[in-house]
Amino acid sequence: MANVVVFDVIETLLDLRALDSDFAQLFGDAGAREQWFQRVLKTALTTTVTGAYQDFGAIGGAALDMTATLRGMRVSADDKRHLRAALTTLPAHPDVMGGLERLKDAGFRLATLSNNPRESSEAQLRNANLSAFFDQMLSAHDVRRLKPAPEPYRYAAEQLGVHVSGMWMVAAHGWDIQGAARAGCRTAFVDRPGHVLSPLADLPTVTGPDIEAVAVRLLEQPSE
């Protein structure tokens, strides 16, 4: 049984829906939050596929401008600063602490791997009272290649001192699961509402509706 488990952060551990009220205030429509985040992901994936690199925070700002343009609006520098600050105070999903505690008590080593720069993800996890669970909080920014490119997953394995095949990647995004699987990781998909795996992608080893369920299923995996 691989005993190193690496978690994606946004939507996997932290609840992005907490920004709905901020987007409702800014755009008059809470649904703009989902539109914005889909543009964040699309821009990040395009950047990665084309071999370029942009800081994930800059991508978030550009996606906000695009969302505003589509709605015939503009966002100010103050609006962007407010949303950046709100992103650092996202709450954990209610299932997260219980699942992390279960894995930690069973002797698993836990880490995170985010596309956000390290300082941003560290602030998010600290403000959500999750930092103490993790041995390391890693960032794709350090290799200047965003997930789902293979380099961030291999970098995480190197930093954690394991072969990539000895590392679980846990995520609520199918593209993250696919990237990790292609890099050689074992994978666990968190099947949160609104998320779905592509039928064309590699299937994860483990699937569960939340972190607690995934933790139980990781504990059931046979030893290697």
Image (cartoon, grey):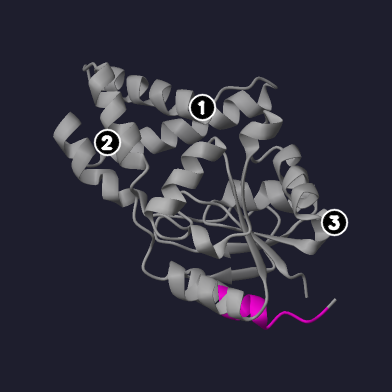
- Is residue 124 rendered magenta in the image? no
Residue kind at label 2, given as amino acid type: Ala
Position of residue 50 relative to residue 167, above or below, is: above
* Element under disc 2: helix
Residue 9 screen position, x and y as percent: 50, 51
Percent x, y for residue 157?
77, 51
- At 66% from the left edge and 19% from the top edge, which residue is drawn? 52
Q: Can you give x and y, in whole percent of width and height, for residue 72 in the image?
A: 22, 17
**In which quadrant of the rendered view does residue 66 lie?**
top left
* Mark 3 surroundings within 10 Å by alpha-carbon count, few (fewer than 14), some (14 through 19), many (20 or more): few
Tag 3: amino acid: His
Circle 1: element type: helix
- Can you identify the residue that label 1 sits on? 43
Q: Is residue 121 left or right of residue 82?
A: right
Which numbered marker is on residue 32? Answer: 2
- Which of the numbered marks, if any, corresponds to residue 87? none
Q: Image quadrant of residue 70?
A: top left
Q: CA distance from mark 3 to mark 1?
A: 30 Å
